[in-house]
Amino acid sequence: ELTYKSSEAKTDQTYQTNNRFELVERLQHSQNLEEIYKKIRDFGFSNRLEENVRMKLYPEQLGNIDVELRKEGKAITIVFVAENEKSKELLEKNIGILRDRLTALDFDVRNMEVKMKEESSYHEDARHYQNQQNQKHGEQNHENKRKAFSEEVMEDDNERKRNG
C-alpha cells in the first residue's frame, strides 16, 4: 500500500509539473500573439501602406516570423512567414482570433495567410549576399591594383626626373 501511495504522489507531481509547463507555454504563446496583434494594429492605424516586420517568438525554439503587411484604405492583407513548423502551427491555430480582434477594430482583413520560409529562399539570400561580398572584394582589389600601378608610374617619373 505504501508503494501505491508513493507512485500516486509521483504521478500527481509529474502531472503538476506538466501542467505548469503547459501553462508557461500557453502564456508565452498568448504574449507572442499579443505582440503580433499590436504590430498589426499599429500598422493599421499608421499612414504606411506597406511594412515588413521580423518578430522574435518565445520560447526560443519557435524562432522568428516575418510579417508582411499591406493596406489599402481599411483593407489589410497579412502574410506570416514562419521559420519552422512549430511557429507555423501556432499562427495557424490562432489566426481566427487575430482576424476577429482586427475586425473588431473596424479593419477589413482581406487576406491572412501563413507560409513556411523556404530553405531555397534562405540559401538564395545567402548566395546573393556572398556574391555582393565577392563583388565588393573584387572592386577593392581592382582599386588597390590601380593605386599601386599609379604609384609605381609616379615613382618611375620621379626617378627619371632625378636622373634626367
Image: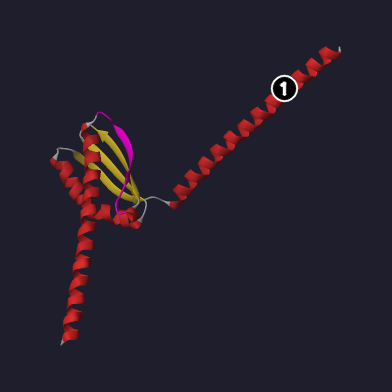
Question: Where's residue 60, x and y in %?
Answer: 33, 53
83 sits to left or right of 125:
left
Decide which of 145, 101 is in the foreground and name it: 145
Q: Residue at x 48, y 48 (%)?
A: 123
Residue assigned mark 1? 151
In this rendered view, identify the residue nearer to me: 49 or 58. Answer: 58
Q: Quadrant of residue 102?
A: top left
The magenta segment? 47-59
Residue visible at 32% across and 57% down in the picture: 86
Front position in the image: 62 or 2: 2
Image height check: is 2 above or below 63? below
- With 97 as the anchor, is 70 left or right in this view? right
Look at 61% across and 31% down and name the residue there: 139
Helix, strand or loop status at disc 1: helix
Q: How is the image coloured?
A: secondary structure
Question: Which residue: 30% across, 54% down?
Answer: 59
- Queried whether the magenta region covers residue 88, the answer comes back as no
